[in-house]
Amino acid sequence: MALIDFEILPVREPVPERDREAILAEPAFGQSFTDHMITLRWSAEKGWHDGRLEPYGPFTLDPATSVFHYGQELFEGMKAYRQDSGSIVLFRPQENAARFNASARRMAMPELPEETFVRALELLVTQDRDWVPTEPGTSLYLRPFLIATQRGLGFTHPSDSYLFCVIASPSAAYFGGGAKPRALTVWLSEDYTRAAPGGTGAAKVGGNYGGSLVASRQATDQGCDQVVWLDSAERTWVEEMGGMNLFFVHTPRNSRPRIMTPALTGTLLPGITRDSLLRLAPTLGIGAEEGRISTGQWRAECASGELTEVFACGTAAVMAPVGTVRGVHGGWTVGDGEPGPITLCLRDELLGIQYGLRPDPFGWIHKVC
Ligand SMILES: *Cc1c(COP(=O)(O)O)cnc(C)c1O
């Protein structure tokens, strides 16, 4: 197959350096965007075509464009990190490419060759490298996405055209960075679920998020930071927290600590941070396994002292400790309600690899420029 290429159309008037520096000094999450974006189109006739690196800016789309009506859409989330050496790197970008295509298959959308996905990211990051912030914990957040662009309200088959786009946003750490992240209070959602067997829970698609906002609002109304999703059938088994995977830390008295995360049953999003921590933990003398845990077990094991820490993980926030749990049947504290030592150790190690402060034994770092 012919290599998919991108035409380079640099912006005539980039954001002035002073304005850019002001944004980079205090980046909010996903509020400011760089000078450029990637676009690439797909049609049944031509396949992937018209790849461009072009000035960041709005699209003009017909109001009858299918994505507005039927939500045929998917996205990815990843970061470019500025390492101490000055190099800018990506973290496991092939994993994002593979998950992008897994989501595409679920949504009956065209797959993008993995090398084209990675190439698009490299082009954008290289072009906008001055937008990668330098402060510890900051990064350039990258948002690749794919939308259905067929015009018309008929709904008998998937769209016959699509638009792939990548935008980039300088970002600080989510939920506060620094050496010690704030512990979150979470709400066990029993009124709403995120995903059901056979649904789209394992795909990174906008609809999963749109449908979750009402539960997030309920969590906020209850004084909580985030919502914890339970399984749809029994409302018993813990699945995820908001848009992040969850880990449970057991510290038995006479043996090594271990981390456990809910197994990928088809209703959970297979996080790349999740996978990285499952691999990284054993190299630090921490056991790692996939399993399952009910809300009842969570509460009982916190009471008995076996379950000492809980944390959520994902690209945007990296790792967020869970300090307090609340639900309609009451609440409890995890450990002493503060970030625990296993959470902080794993977080340090993972951030160390991403920022080039630690060796990269798994070859996860992908140098861009
Ligand atoms: C993106 C996402 C995650 C985390 O995935 P990472 O690859 O670690 O960023 C977890 N859960 C949901 C629902 C997500 O959308």
Image (tube, grey):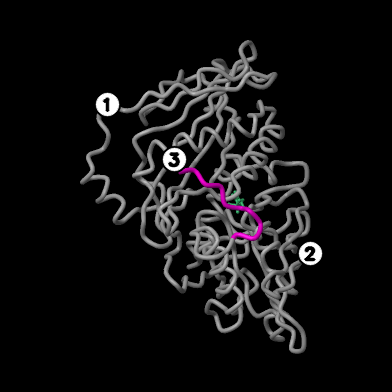
For numbered disc 2, what is the local secondary structure?
Answer: strand
- Compared to residue 248, the image places residue 193 above or below, namely above
Dot in front, 1 or 2: 1
- Which SS class for mark 3? helix
Give x and y (percent) for residue 259: 70, 71
Q: Give the class, few, some or many, for how many residues have Cα within 10 Å of label 2's Cα (few <14, many ≥20).
A: few
Identify the residue at horizontal 42%, vertical 59% (top origin). Answer: 84
- What is the three-letter code of the residue carrying label 1? Arg
- Find residue 284 and report its horizontal and vertical position in percent: 67, 73
- Viewer-closest of 25 and 247: 25
Q: Which residue is mark 3?
A: 125
- Check disc 2 and report the residue beneath it: 291
The residue where tag 1 is placed is 12
Secondary-structure class at tag 1? loop
- Quadrant of the snapshot with the N terminus: top right
Does the magenta stretch mainly form a helix, a strand or a loop?
A: loop
* Cα gap from disc 1 to disc 2, whole angstroms: 53 Å
Q: Please, which residue is most extreme toward the front here?
A: 85
